Image (cartoon, helix red, strand yellow):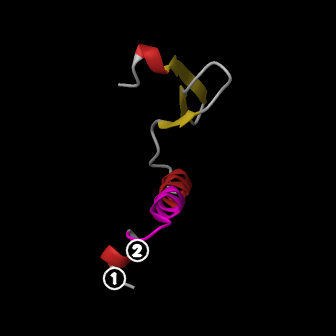
Amino acid sequence: MSLTDAFTGPDDGARLADLHARLGRRAEQEEILDVAYRTVASPVGELLLAATPRGLVRIAYQVQGFE
């Protein structure tokens, strides 16, 4: 499978999510992860969660901006 084939097709979202998860695990295993972040759906809207190896460092609402 070529790199192009790996990211095309009806399940692009699932493949990219899998790639993202694998890269995050690898970075954590190699201790090169400074800050990990992700967005999650919640009853109050989309949230940004940011964490370091010591714990959660930021929670932001979408209206606050995720930059």
Of residues 57 and 4, the one nearer the viewer is: 4
Q: Residue at x 39, y 19 (%)?
A: 65
Question: On the rendered image, what quadrant is the C terminus found in?
Answer: top left
Would residue 24 appear left or right of 6 to someone viewing this image?
Answer: right
Residue furthest toward the front? 10
Tell which residue pokes out farthest to the bottom in this image: 1
Q: Amino acid at mark 1?
A: Ser
The mark found on residue 6 in the picture is 2
Identify which residue is drawn at 50% across, 36% down: 37
In the picture provided, is 2 more to the left or to the right than 30? Answer: left
| Magenta highlight: main SS | helix
Q: Which quadrant would the N terminus be assigned to in this image?
A: bottom left
Q: Secondary structure at mark 2?
A: helix
Q: Pointer 1: what residue?
A: 2
The reply to whether discs 2 and 1 touch (Cβ–Cβ < 8 Å) is yes
Query: Which of the pair 54/14 is nearer the observer?
Result: 14
- How packed is label 1: few (under 14 Cα within 10 Å), some, or many (20 or more)? few
